[in-house]
Each structure stands twice: as structure tokens, then as C-alpha cells.
Image (spheres, coloured by chain):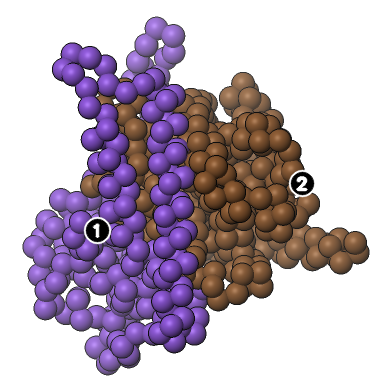
Chain colours: A purple, B brown
Amino acid sequence: MHIHAFDQFRAHASALHRLDPRVKVLLTVGYILSNALLPDGSWLAFAAAWLLLLWSNERAHLGLGYTFKRSFVAFPFAIAAISAIFSPSGNSLAEWNLGFVTLVPTDFGVVRFFSILVRSWLSVQMAILLVTTTQFPDLIHAFEHLKAPRTLTTIIAFLYRYLFVLTDEAYRLMRAREARSAGLPGFKRGGSLFWRAKITGEMAGQLFLRSYERSDRIYNAMLARGYTGHIRTLNPHTMQHSDWLTLFFSIPVLLLIQLIGWYR
Amino acid sequence: MLLSPTPLHIPDGFLNLVISLIFWVATISMVGLAISKTNKTLGEKQIPLMGVMAAFIFAAQMLNFPVAGGTSGHFLGGALAAMVLGPWAGILVMTAVIAVQGLLFQDGGLLVMGANIFNMGILTAVIGFGLYRMVGGAKKGLRLTIAGAAAWLATMAAALLTALQLWLSGTSRLEIVLPAMLGVHILIGIGEAVITVAALAFIERTRPDLLNAEKTAASGGRGWIMAGILVSLLAVLISPLASGSPDGLERVAADLGFLGDGQASSYQILPDYTIPLLGETALSTIFAGIVGALILMGLLVLLGRSLRKAGSGK
């Protein structure tokens, strides 16, 4: 597998790509926080937040609809919010009798449902924009600068580095299983569901042992090359004037969105 | 994408700020504790080990098996990680996995990541390791049975807590979301249990040195057994109670101030503490969130202190 199979980063020479990763992390979290704080049904503020997102997409030279196209990852989860439509407070809009249960959608419930959906949809897109414009090692480094515990960031750095290797290993195991599970057309392949789950479990055990032994080798190799407990990088990550400016000008923008939401 | 979102990875926007902050505080304190514990017991060698193990959980989640009708079961791994690596390392490994899933693949949100880590990393470690450790020295058959039961229960508890969080956030109706979540996860949990048991049995057969009773005992003490049993009992008691009479639980939550009239406002956790000057604004919401988080932090500190005293008294 190619090492960039998981990488969401898209290289462009844009202002957003050059922005310090720390600032990008803070702005993304600020944006998601701002969405969470907006009251239900503040459509004007949601629209303003969406415009900000579109503008950021454009600034990153990705095209207006880039994050939109990839924003449906969180969609299956929307099922969880459907029951909000039938909230007991608010005025009933209709009455659906399904035989065993009567469902009453209310105006309050409908507004709540769509507000949850919009909030989630905007937040996911900003998170996508963050990883599209920032390389993952830079992102980890940013969290380190933002005082995330070094143990954790280093574990995550290792996870990212060996993700490709171990996924390759997992695919090798699955290819081997596929190759051994030959069958004639029209005949059932493999055993029962229980058997299949058990085989998957043994494959997980096998993968565990391979990973465990590999981590031993990695550690020895790192010791041999002078590992002292944390990973060093060449990127200095210094905040430029433009980074500070972006940070300071973004705060009033987010406040303005809040203002629109609360005092429309 | 290779990873299909599982029903346990909550995206941003589905939990309100207060619930998100409370679970961030709980998660941060547990992860902080896990870091200091693992630093003491494992030393610097832990970091490459846990990093590669986190990548292992990630890759193992890709090992899927066809179930029926184009769907496939796959593996969460929280309980297995805690059983093989010990609870503290297991928590760190799952934290890294969930952080990367949220950051890189948007599988789970950023603001709600605290809740996601708590549900899938910490809760599963407490139940998984606690129950497994209880039968550490027992015969192989019993040990594996309990391991399977623990993996199933950990999955169910994570689903239960996710449902409760969604309900407390005013996102879902309890009487709908709870049976739905638990129903789906009864099956997912069985898959998880079979995979966990098969993986454990395989590791024991090929590398028994990694799983012997002394090693398990060294990675966590009596406190984990107690916590595991307590949390499991709690999950087992709450589930039927809440599914059977959601009105009862709703009444309790309303009395405690978690719910306003029919979940009208999502931010009713400190109804009497809204600051008159600020009114019903974002600022008072943030303030209520911070107060709630501080209360929880205080409780955790007290709990930690009393645990330490009990530990030194022995």
C-alpha cells in the first residue's frame, strides 16, 4: 500500500496552508465551539458560519465545494437525532399513526433536529479543512506546542507512522484468508458466522503478535540510533506576524456569528 | 473510505457543550493518571510499544468478517487492549486510536472527543480489565469465558453511555435511542466477545509469556477489580431500568436539573446558577459548563485522594 493512502493532506501554496498549525487547531476548535453555542434555529448565524467556511475553502485553493463533497461521513449518525423531531414540547404539526405507536412531530422538534444536523455538518467540514491543509506530523507538533502531554503526542506520532505498515500486514492476512477460502461456484464458502468471527479473532491475535515483536525491533533500532524518549523534528514552528494577525482577526468574526445567533 | 463510522463515534454537534465538557474533564483526568502510571511502570520503552499497539488496534479494526446482506462486523478492541497491555496502557492506546480517528478521518468529533474516549477507551478498559483480572489465576476455560463476557458487557456499557449522553444533550428521546443502541450492540458485542476470546486464546497458545497471571496482576490491582465489578453492575442495573421505564429515569434527571421541560433547553444543568447579568446567553452557558466541570473535577480529586489514602494504609 502506498504510504499516502490515509493522508488527507492536499498540497497547495495557499495562505491557509502556510498558517501556523497551532493557529489552525485553535481556530477549528473555536469554530466548532461557536457552532455548539449557537441556539437552535438561528439559521442566519448558521448561514454566516457556512459563508466563513466557503471563504476558507476558497482561501485554501481547494474550490468552494471541496469540504462539502467529503462532509457526509457523519451522516449515518443523524439517525440518532431523528427522535428529536418527536419532542414533547412545542406545537404538534401532524399525527402519524403507525399502528402500534403514534408519532407526533412538533415544530420545536423539527427545528431542533435540523439545528443538530447543520451544527454537525458545519463542524465536520471545518475539521476536514484542518487536515486537508495541515500535514499530520505538523498537527501533532501543534498539539505538543498547545501543551498536550508529550507521552500522548509521541504515541500518536508512532501510531501514524506504523499505521500504514500494520494495515499492510492486516491486508496480507486478509488476502491469505481469501486465498485459502477457495470454493466452487454454487457451494457455500467457509463455515458458520461464529466460525468466521473466531477466525477473525485468531487473525487479530496473529496481528497482535506481529505488531508486538515489531515494536521490540523498532525500539532496539531506535536505541541504536540514540533515542532519548521523544521525537525531534526539524520544523521550528515559530509564530509569524501574519499568524498572530489571523488569530486576532478571527475572534471578532466568531463573536459576530454568535451575536447574529443570539440577537437576531 | 476503509473505515465505516460505527454507531459509537459521536460526531460534533450531537452532544451539548456541558456534556462534552464534563466528559472532557473526566477523560483528561483519567488519561493524565494513565500517563503518570505508565511512566512509572514501563519507562521510556512504553512509548514505541504503545504507539505500535495503537496502530495494531487501528489495523485490527479493519479485519472484518462478512455477516449478512453486505454488512460486516468489525472490532472495537478496547477490552482486548486493556486485557493484554494492562488497563493504563490500554487507556492510552485507545485514546491515541480515537484521537486519530477523529482528527484524520472525522470518525467522531473534536469537541465531543472527550466523551468518545471515555465511552470507548476508559469504560471498556475498566470493565474489560476489571472482570478479566478478577479471574486472573483461574483455569483457562473460565478465564476466557469471563473475558468474552467482559468484552460483550464493555460494548454494551459503551452503547448505554452513548445513548444516555445523547439523551442528556437533548438530541434523542431516551425511549427510542436506548433500546435502539442496546439492540444493535447486543449483536456487535457478541462479535466483539468472540474475536476477543479467539485473539486471547491464540496469543496464549503461541506466546504464553505475554499473558501469564503474574503479568496481569502486576499491571493493575484490587482497585481495578472493584471498579470493574461496580461499573458492570451499574451498567447491568441501569439498562433494564431505563429501557423498562424511561419515564422514571427522565424524572430523576429532571429532578437533578439535567433536563428542562421536555428538553426545551439543552443547558439546564445548573438552572439556578445562571448569572442574572448574563441571562440566557452563550456566556452563561460557558460559565455553567465551567462550573459543572469544576464540580466534577473536585469530586475526582477527592476520590483520587481517598483512594491514595486507602492504598497507603495497606
Which residue ends up furthest to the top in the rendered image?
Answer: A99
For label 2, the crowd category at 10 Å Cα-Cα, with few meaning under 14, some 14 to 19 and many 20 or more, is some
Q: Which residue is mark 1?
A: A6
Question: Could you say whether the residue bearing mark 1 is in a helix, strand or loop?
Answer: loop
Question: Could you say whether the residue bearing mark 2 is in a helix, strand or loop?
Answer: helix
Question: Could you tell me if residue B26 is visible in this image?
Answer: no
Chain bearing tag 2 is: B
Left or right: where does residue B127 sit relative to residue B79? Answer: right
Determine whether B169 is above or below A132 in the image: above
Quadrant of residue B40 within the rendered picture: bottom right
Determine whether A182 is above or below B209 in the image: above
Chain bearing tag 1 is: A
Q: Quadrant of the C terminus of chain A?
A: bottom left
Residue B307 position in % (x across, y down): 80, 60
Q: Residue at x 41, y 33 (%)?
A: A199
Mark 1 and mark 2 on one chain: no
Q: Residue B43 versus residue B153: which sits nearer the camera?
A: B43
Residue A93 position in % (x across, y down): 34, 25
